[in-house]
Image (tube, rainbow, N blue to C red):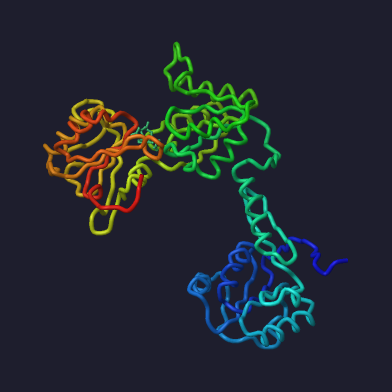
């Protein structure tokens, strides 16, 4: 048997006494997993890093502000020795050995009776990697496995609860890197993907050939409304036992009709998971160098749909009230009606020289930004040939100089 071979095991530490000596960087890194495991943690150290102190203040560990003393491991199931005092560490590990307490010594792997693996978690799977004496290699292997589980490239077929199911996934504003980890994984597990025109279209090209990709805009709707036809398609595919992802641009619940789909699925008795997404309302300004809030400049931002003109009786927006706000206004779907919107805002009191930025196709390779004022924005949008999708940002935040951005 090799000295470098450790027997892997998962310790169930809930409610069990664990003693940690030292409260520096090593302890700071190890404590969250011990806390997550529900261990009864006693931390012994005269001082602590600010983060460890915060854990003690939050009641997650019991901190005894002193040095190690013989007898500290009494009743412990597991011990971590992380101080930078080699003598104290040696005495403590001798005590642990004598008491048969499994013990990790951060300063001396040889003197340890246990080794901490590089660990990671993804959706209920814990990955723990030991490579003997090469912690960097352990971390690299751990990262590769966790990444593969998260993005679905590492096949780890789960025991899928049989029966129909749909995931409403917010795909983010367009850049394929801006989908959430969960969204990406569900996409990798899908049999059918019903996708919008907006969102991370590039991700669809990466799906394996057996996955049926349906363009939501092209679902024939005949005697139904387009939305009803989409709902029906989701229901039919789910009932046929397929794993269905409804991939939407941005966040499903920000002008995305996500709740209508969730309701239709609920009515049909089909369970649905909602995966939030990065909304274009915040991310598109951000990549164009515009923070929607900024200290001393804007204490609020309001996201408004501009698809209905202010004088349209069906409008639900109080434009006169919005004109009185000092903060940032973010308009989606507003390119077409920007003339009447800007005129209404000026009419009700927003200054005509308020700076405005329009960002078209944000986060994609074709992103562009046009700057104007409230008085000139309609004319600039027309002159520059701005087309949807675009986000209009109104307010002083658009005039803040920023660093590098696309
Ligand atoms: C029907 S709404 C959906 C919004 C989406 N649910 C979200 O959270 O971003 C579509 C509008 O979002 C905005 N939009 C979405 N993606 C965009 C992008 N990449 N660049 C600029 N605007 C975008 C545009 O205003 C577009 O007309």
Q: Horizontal and vertical percent for residue 148?
A: 63, 45
Image point (53%, 82%), residue name: 47
Quarter the C terminus occupies = top left
What residue is shown at x 58% (from left), y 82% (from top)?
Answer: 45
Residue 279 percent coordinates (x, y): 40, 41
| Rendered view: 106 above or below 142 | below
Question: Is 274 positioned to the left or the right of 124 in the image?
Answer: left
Location of ligand 1 given as a quarter of the image: top left
Q: Residue at x 64, y 71 (%)?
A: 40
Q: Is residue 248 left or right of residue 92?
A: left
Residue 265 place in picture, x, y as percent: 52, 29
Q: Is residue 382 left or right of residue 277?
A: left
Residue found farthest to the right: 1
Q: Position of residue 22 (x, y in %)?
A: 60, 79
Residue nearest the viewer, comparing 1 with 232: 1
Question: Of 264 and 379, which appears nearest the observer?
Answer: 379
Number of numbered discs: 0
Q: Report which quarter residue 213 is drawn in.
A: top right
The quadrant of the rendering that contains the N terminus is: bottom right
- Residue 128, by quadrant, is bottom right
Task: Name the foreground residue: 187 vs 276.
Answer: 187
- In the rendered structure, the answer to whether residue 317 lies left or right of residue 256 reads left
182 lies above or below 20: above
């Amino acid at each position: 048997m090799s000295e470098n071979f450790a027997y892997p095991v998962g310790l169930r530490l809930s409610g069990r006494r664990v003693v940690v000596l030292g409260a520096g960087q090593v302890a700071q890194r190890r404590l969250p997993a011990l806390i997550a495991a529900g261990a009864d943690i006693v931390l012994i150290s005269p001082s602590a890093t600010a983060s460890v102190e915060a854990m003690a203040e939050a009641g997650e560990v019991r901190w005894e502000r002193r040095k190690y003393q013989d007898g500290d491991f009494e009743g412990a199931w597991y011990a971590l020795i992380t101080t930078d005092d080699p003598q104290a560490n040696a005495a403590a590990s001798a005590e642990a050995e004598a008491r048969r307490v499994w013990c990790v010594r951060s300063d001396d792997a040889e003197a340890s009776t246990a080794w901490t693996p590089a660990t990671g978690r993804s959706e209920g799977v814990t990955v723990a990697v030991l490579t003997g004496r090469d912690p960097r290699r352990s971390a690299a292997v751990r990262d590769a496995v966790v990444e593969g589980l998260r993005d679905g490239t590492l096949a780890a077929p789960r025991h899928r609860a049989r029966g129909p199911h749909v995931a409403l996934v917010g795909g983010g504003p367009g850049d394929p890197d801006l989908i959430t980890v969960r969204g990406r994984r569900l996409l990798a597990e899908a049999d059918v993907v019903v996708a919008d025109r907006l969102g991370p279209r590039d991700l669809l090209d990466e799906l394996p050939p057996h996955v049926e990709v349906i363009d939501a805009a092209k679902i024939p709707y005949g005697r139904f409304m387009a939305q009803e036809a989409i709902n029906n398609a989701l229901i039919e595919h789910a009932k046929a036992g397929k794993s269905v992802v409804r991939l939407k641009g941005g966040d499903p619940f920000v002008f995305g009709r996500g709740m209508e789909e969730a309701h239709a699925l609920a009515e049909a008795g089909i369970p649905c998971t909602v995966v939030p997404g990065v909304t274009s309302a915040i991310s598109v300004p951000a990549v164009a160098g515009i923070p929607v809030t900024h200290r001393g400049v804007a204490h609020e931002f309001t996201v408004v749909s501009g698809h209905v003109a202010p004088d349209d009786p069906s409008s639900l927006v109080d434009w006169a009230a919005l004109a009185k706000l000092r903060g940032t206004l973010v308009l989606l779907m507003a390119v077409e009606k920007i003339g009447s919107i800007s005129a209404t805002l000026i009419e009700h009191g927003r200054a005509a020289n308020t700076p405005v930025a329009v960002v078209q196709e944000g986060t994609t390779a074709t992103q562009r930004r046009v700057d104007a004022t409230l008085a000139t924005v309609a004319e600039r949008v027309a002159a520059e040939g701005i087309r949807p999708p675009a986000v209009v940002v109104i307010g002083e935040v658009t005039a803040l100089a920023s660093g590098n951005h696309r």
